[in-house]
Structure formats: C-alpha cells, structure tokens
Amino acid sequence: MEDSDDVPAIGEINSTLELLSHPSIGVVDHFEEGYQLLTDSENSVRLVRSLGDVVQLPAATNN
C-alpha cells in the first residue's frame, strides 16, 4: 500500500492470510490466538515475490 490511509478491507486481509498460511507457502500459521509469522521478514518478502502473477497489485483508478 502506497498510501498509509489506504487500509485494506477485512476480506482482503483474510484472503491474504489464507494465502500466506497455505502449506506450499508457509509464511504464517493459524492458531487459536490468531496468525503467527513462521519466518523472518526478508524471507517472507522473497517467498511472496516468488509467487509472481498469483499476487497482483490492484488496478490504478482514473479519477
């Protein structure tokens, strides 16, 4: 997110956490208390970038 005032919707956050907790990615794990990061931030960024077209930025809007 480029603008700190641009907060994602709860559904977007949940979808992202589900993707990151998928066993083939394994960046986070879901526990009763919530989600826990399973790797360091540098490795997390590398893993997410390796997903390529799976992770897409939202289309720019023309105002």
Image (spheres, rainbow, N blue to C red):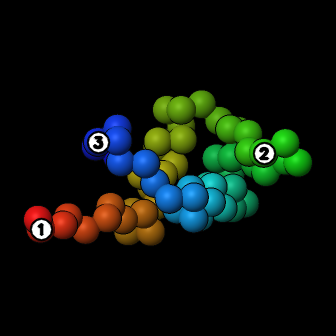
- Residue 6: assigned label: none
Q: Nearer the viewer, mark 1 or mark 2?
A: 1
Q: CA distance from mark 2 to mark 3?
A: 26 Å
Q: Helix or strand or loop: what does disc 3 sit on?
A: loop
Q: Helix or strand or loop: what does disc 1 sit on?
A: loop
Which amino acid lies under the numbered mark 1 shown in the image of this protein?
Asn
Please report the residue visible at 64 percent of the width from the left and 47 percent of the height from the top: 27
Within the image, what quadrant is residue 14 found in?
bottom right
Task: Classify residue 45 as left or right of residue 20.
Answer: left
Label 1: few (<14), some (14–19) or many (≥20) C-alpha neighbours in 10 Å:
few
Q: Work out whether 52 lies above or below 47.
A: below
Task: Classify residue 28 as left or right of residue 63.
Answer: right
Q: Work out whether 62 lies above or below 5.
A: below
Residue 11: percent from the left, percent from the top?
A: 57, 65
Residue for badge 2: 34
Q: Helix or strand or loop: what does disc 2 sit on?
A: strand
Q: CA distance from mark 1 to mark 3?
A: 16 Å
Q: Are dots 1 and 2 in contact, CB under 8 Å?
A: no
- Residue 3: assigned label: 3
Q: CA distance from mark 1 to mark 2?
A: 37 Å
Which of the two discs, 1 and 3, labels the residue nearer the N terminus? 3
Which amino acid lies under the numbered mark 3 shown in the image of this protein?
Asp
- Residue 62: assigned label: 1
Of the 4 image quadrants, the one containing the C terminus is: bottom left
Q: Are dots 2 and 3 in contact, CB under 8 Å?
A: no
Please report the residue visible at 88 percent of the width from the left and 48 percent of the height from the top: 32
Q: Are dots 1 and 3 in contact, CB under 8 Å?
A: no
